[in-house]
């Protein structure tokens, strides 16, 4: 099955409201016991407006916000059994806490094939409700294209 | 260069992968459904790469105040399976200026008990 590189793939912007319960659930799944993710009073004492997001929480924003696995598979015509996560980068420009609503503008950074591997990189700029850039996320997924 | 305190995580379980799938919203079945992991030629399920990065992120917010973290970038090198016990290691490698902001630069890695590197990455924290 051949699928072309879809450089013209349109990734839809989306909006997401960060909730305390989702942060807690996420931290628990990682086994991260840092109290700033569980207790708003402790978070405030540590200088946060509310419970802050863990460093990798943007993945939950992306998956639950609209760029989930099934969507990526169908957008790029990938074989779901052959997809792996190659790399991930975050740049944190502003604080993100429970109660914040942010908008995400995803874009395709690159898509190419090399030695039976297909690399797709997606970058997402996040802005807070005041329109200020707070976060950049960049994710590279790899599809193994072997013939076995 | 200064080494940071090594963080030891408990053994990864199938249940943890199910929990992480629900929490993160990544329902790729190669992480939770054993027959699909086998069909994918993975010899069972593998952990989400982002769970492993999440553990490295836990270490970063343990080593430095969470709000000082400015950059966190990783590459996933090996797959992780239920039953593995991971440790997170890090070190500060230098300093750099980003406009008027002074930052420490560092490296982080996640390994299993045999020393196999699952993830390696870089970070920057505001001083």
Image (cartoon, rainbow, N blue to C red):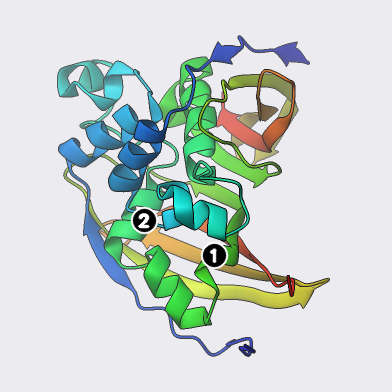
In this figure, which residue is indicated by the disc labeled 2? B27
- The N terminus of chain A, quarter of image: bottom right
Judged left or right of residue A118, residue B65 is left
| Residue drawn where x is 70% and y is 19% of the image | B91
| Residue drawn where x is 57% and y is 25% of the image | B84
Corner quadrant of residue A43: top left
Residue A12 visible to the viewer: yes
Query: Which subunit holds the residue at mark 1?
Result: A
- The C terminus of chain A, quarter of image: bottom right
Furthest residue toward right: A115
Judged left or right of residue A50, residue B105 is right
Residue B99: where, in percent of width, then height?
Answer: 62, 44
* Viewer-side residue, A25 vs B86: B86
Judged left or right of residue B124, residue A53 is left
Residue A60: where, in percent of width, then height?
Answer: 34, 50
Residue A88: where, in percent of width, then height?
Answer: 58, 51
Judged left or right of residue B59, residue A61 is left
* Viewer-side residue, A140 vs B124: A140
Residue A132 visible to the viewer: no
In this figure, which residue is indicated by the disc labeled 1? A81
């Amino acid at each position: 099955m051949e699928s072309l590189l879809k450089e013209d793939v349109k990734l839809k912007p989306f909006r997401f409201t960060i909730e305390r319960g989702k942060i807690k659930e996420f931290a628990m799944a990682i086994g991260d016991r840092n109290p700033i993710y569980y207790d708003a009073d402790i978070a405030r004492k540590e200088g946060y407006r509310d419970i802050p997001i863990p460093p990798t929480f943007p993945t939950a924003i992306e998956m639950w916000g609209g760029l989930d696995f099934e969507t990526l598979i169908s957008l790029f015509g990938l074989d779901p059994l052959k997809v792996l996560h190659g790399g991930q980068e975050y740049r944190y420009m502003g604080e993100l806490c429970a109660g914040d609503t942010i908008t995400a503008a995803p874009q395709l950074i690159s898509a190419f094939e090399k030695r039976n591997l297909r690399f797709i990189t997606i970058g997402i700029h996040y802005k807070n409700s005041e329109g200020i850039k707070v976060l950049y996320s960049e994710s590279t997924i790899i599809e193994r294209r072997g013939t076995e | 260069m200064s080494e940071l305190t090594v963080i030891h995580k408990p053994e990864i379980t199938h249940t943890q992968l199910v929990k992480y799938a629900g929490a993160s919203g990544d329902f790729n079945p190669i992480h939770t459904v054993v027959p699909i992991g086998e069909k994918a030629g993975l010899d069972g399920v593998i952990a989400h790469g982002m769970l492993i990065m999440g553990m490295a992120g836990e270490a970063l917010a343990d080593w430095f105040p969470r709000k000082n973290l400015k950059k966190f970038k990783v590459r996933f090198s090996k797959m992780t399976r239920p039953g593995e016990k991971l440790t997170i290691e890090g070190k500060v490698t230098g300093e750099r200026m980003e406009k008027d902001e002074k930052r420490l630069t560092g490296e982080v890695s996640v390994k299993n008990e045999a020393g196999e590197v699952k993830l390696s990455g870089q970070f920057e924290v505001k001083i």
